[in-house]
Amino acid sequence: MWRRITAQSFIPCQLHIRRSSTLSDINRFLSSLKIQGTNLKTLKQAHCSMIITGLHKDNLIVAKLIEACSVAGHLRYAYSVFTHQPFPNTYLHNTMIRALSLVDEPNAHSVAVLVYRKFWSLCPKPDTFTFPFALKIAVRLSDVWFGRQVHSQTVVSGFDSSVHVVTSLIQMYCSCEVLGDARKVFDEMPVRDVTVWNALLAGYGKVGEVDEARRLLEMMPCWVRNVVSWTCVISAYAKKGRASEAIEVFQRMVMEDVEPDEVTLLAALSACADLGSLELGERICSYVDHRGMKRGVSLNNALIDMYAKSGNITKALEVFERVDERNVVTWTTIITGLATHGLGGEALTMFNRMVKAGVQPNSVTFIAVLSACSHVGLVDLGKRLFTSMRSEYRIEPNIEHFGCLIDLLGRAGRLREAEEVSKTMPFEANAAIWGSLLAASNVHHDVELGERALNQLIKLEPNNSGNYMLLANLYADLGKWEESRMMRKMMKGIGVKKMAGESSIVVENRVYRFISGDFSHPHAVKIHELLQEIDLQIQSNEI
């Protein structure tokens, strides 16, 4: 038999709310939710209580319930509550759109678009929050056409001069990689505050337009620039691989007495690591300690990476052993550093320590571990670890993991097995894999594999001179001089030029780059004279 459900059976003692909707009622209601918890049963009881007491007619209280539902992960129920509101106002629509924008579900984002469009027919009175929430949905969906519709509505409603709205518009266009429209919105803004400037700076950095970001930073009034402005450019340079320019901007920032935050320091240390600039990295470390800044996990990870990439693996190990808190990135960074320095055995020992410490390895960890196996020639162990990714750790190998396995087999001379893996893997072999097979064929003098690999590489990287040179050298090593000569002639015929060698050094915190055949340095003549003198001294000592 159906049990008779009374109103009282739905209402916990803590959820009694008076019929009059006052501020104290709302606070009491929210306190009740905190006390009772936010499981679905409690939320439904709260909703029932609101209906019985008449508080469901108050859009503000309903909005608070929708927020509580969405935070607790019950978005479907939140949307159901919203759809049953007879007269939802702007605030309630904003709350629902925002809740839908916070989850990583494309269906929820599509529903948010419907809610936004329905809003205009029910209560066409937007506020400064309506458009940013809607534009966030455009970002989530990468739907620039919907974003443009929202943009036109900001103009019609007179909100196109609002700082919050303009910032969201710039972020939307940048996210959809329509930088021309983002710049147009920026240029048409009569009064710009730092958030507007930083939105465009971050947008340029995100899509790799680092030179535009640098020019925009130079345009920025000095009294407007803040730590975020500088960090946007520093991070953009670091991600683009232009480490020396990242360091240059960082040094300018410090000279202008702008104190870097943790994000800035991470970007600067990343640039130091790429440059191998140990001295500058240590100065940044001293700066952190001198300022009394706390070294968080991310900063310690960056220091370990910097020391490892700068050639001081001993110091990297010291920092690793000294830190109190380690995450999977910490372990992976030190394992990668050890493997890169040819310390494969130590890297594998560190991996075992990581597993015993109860830290779950991720896909990047396995790239480092498989690389370590390559360096020490532990083929069988590497194959077992590759298999364990699925069986023990439920990590699906990607093309980089297959590339590591192929490199492992190739280095060990098991070329046929390596080539077979490249044919049977669930990915199309890329340039890195064919390059690995070409390098292995060069080491183990397998001309046939080398020719097959080069034929594929010509399709994927027709202008990479290194590929042609590997096979030309292989021919030369085997005494096939005519084939080697023809390979070099082919390079010349199709216009492939050998890439110039490049190096850099840091002297007194300034980075100097040297490129083979380049005489653009102001002291190039003196440098070459000194090099010749050193070369003569070396030759005389050998005699």
Image (cartoon, rainbow, N blue to C red):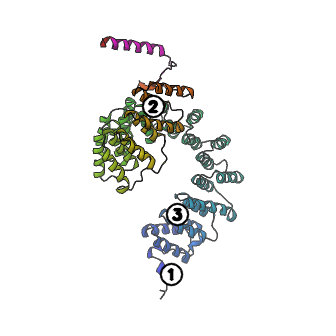
The kind of secondary structure element at disc 3 is helix
Residue receiving disc 2: 471
Taking depth in this image into account, of 369 and 13 the one nearest to the observer is: 369
The kind of secondary structure element at disc 2 is helix
Distance between the Cα atoms at labels 2 and 1? 83 Å
| Secondary structure predominantly adopted by residues drawn in magenta | helix
**Kind of residue at disc 3:** Glu
The kind of secondary structure element at disc 1 is helix
| Horizontal and vertical percent position of residue 454 | 48, 36
The range drawn in magenta is 515-539
Figure quadrant of residue 332: top left
Q: Residue at x 40, y 30 (%)?
A: 277
Taking depth in this image into account, of 137 and 453 the one nearest to the observer is: 453
Q: Residue at x 48, y 49 (%)?
A: 427
Earlier along the polypeptide chain: callout 2 or callout 3?
3
Taking depth in this image into account, of 233 and 240 the one nearest to the observer is: 240
* In the image, residue 186 lies in the stretch drawn in magenta: no
